[in-house]
Amino acid sequence: MLVVLSGGTGGAKLIQGISEEVDPSELTIICNTADDFVLHGLHISPDLDTIMYTLAGVADGSKGWGIQDDTFTTLAQLKKLGAETWFQLGDQDLATHIMRTRLLREGLPLSKITARLNTCLGVKATILPMTDDAVETRVKTSQGEISFQEYFVKQRWQPEVKEIFYAGVQSSNPSPGVIEAIERARRIIICPSNPVTSIGPILAVPGIRNAIKTANASVIGVSPIIGDSAISGPAHKLMVAQGHEASALGVAQTYVDLLDSFLIDKADEELCGKIQRSGIKTSATSIRMDSQAEKRRLAREVLALADK
Ligand code: FO1
């Protein structure tokens, strides 16, 4: 059994590679839901959807979110009607949010809805939201407190960040199957997702971090940072805001109690020794995944490390 912890875009690339290397019935993805928010009255789960569309083979790989070749007719009409349109919702993507919102209103938990949507789209792997409870990443900036999507999409991660916190996480519970999947896992992979806003919330759900720590599995991480910048997005800025160093070493330190092995970019090779001194076997390779072949090659390297 293979368990993968992931956020959206960066994680989806590795997961796409992994899905070509392993039997989907053996693959469980535990996905961040602290980016979820409500817009136009609809419950949007960006990371769950990015992973679902990726495994269904319909993801828009160039944008890193949404559905390939989707149209934006509804959004254009919403704009005419005076709605806020800073968050680009495609017509087909909207169907996912309408269905999820309807089922939530009918009382179904997010985990059941996720399973249903994935089955409808032909996804064979298991995608589990980290929790069925409401947890929300909040960003304290120099201009006040905002939601993660306002910071990330509306304000294009420009405001100075003072602090990040996960509202509601202390009273949340792992969704059904999360702890069981970790306990059964032979390999656990921490994707090159944002350590603060994607993996951080998953590990903050009470019980998850400890389950990984005590699991009888090899735990392998991949850095989302090369040099002092994230491959994409604001991970480096948010790491600094949370008191971590913006580097592969800083990422390794945030997972030091969990990792057996860590993959960093070959440009950071000189950090291998330092990270290794904290007890984590570290190797340098190319961690960029700009092509299908690179996604698959990195997936193979990660899986091989887990088998060592
Ligand atoms: N990211 C953007 O940068 N701009 C968008 O307009 C946008 C729309 C969007 C719609 C649906 C969806 O599932 C994701 C979307 N994202 C968009 C991506 C997203 O919000 C972030 O990449 C994640 O939350 C970070 O993991």
Image: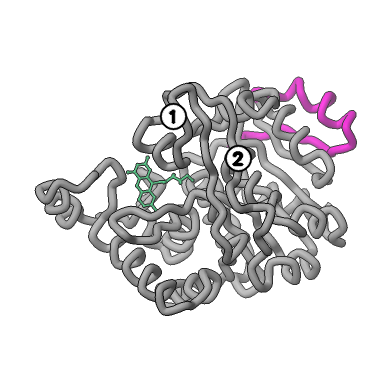
Residue pointed to by mark 2: 165
Q: How many marks?
A: 2
The tag on residue 157 is 1
Q: Looking at this rendering, what residue extends furthest in the left direction? A: 80
Q: Position of residue 271 (x, y in %)?
A: 76, 23
Residue plotted at (84% across, 60% down): 215
Q: Position of residue 256 (x, y in %)?
A: 81, 39
Q: Quadrant of residue 125?
A: bottom right
> Vertically, is 113 above or below 199?
below
Q: Position of residue 280 (x, y in %)?
A: 84, 38
Residue 174 lies left or right of residue 63; in this view the side is right
Q: Quadrant of residue 268?
A: top right
Residue 256, visible in the rendered structure: yes
In magenta, the rendered stretch is 267-287
Tell me which label, 1 or 2, sits earlier in the chain.
1
Badge 1 density bin: few <14, some 14–19, many ≥20, Cα 10 Å: some
The tag on residue 286 is none
**Residue nearer the viewer, 148 or 141:** 141
Q: Position of residue 46 (x, y in %)?
A: 44, 53
Say what amino acid the circle numbered 1 marks.
Answer: Trp
Say what amino acid the circle numbered 2 marks.
Answer: Phe
Residue 278 falls within the magenta-colored stretch: yes
Residue 238 falls within the magenta-colored stretch: no
Q: Quadrant of residue 284?
A: top right
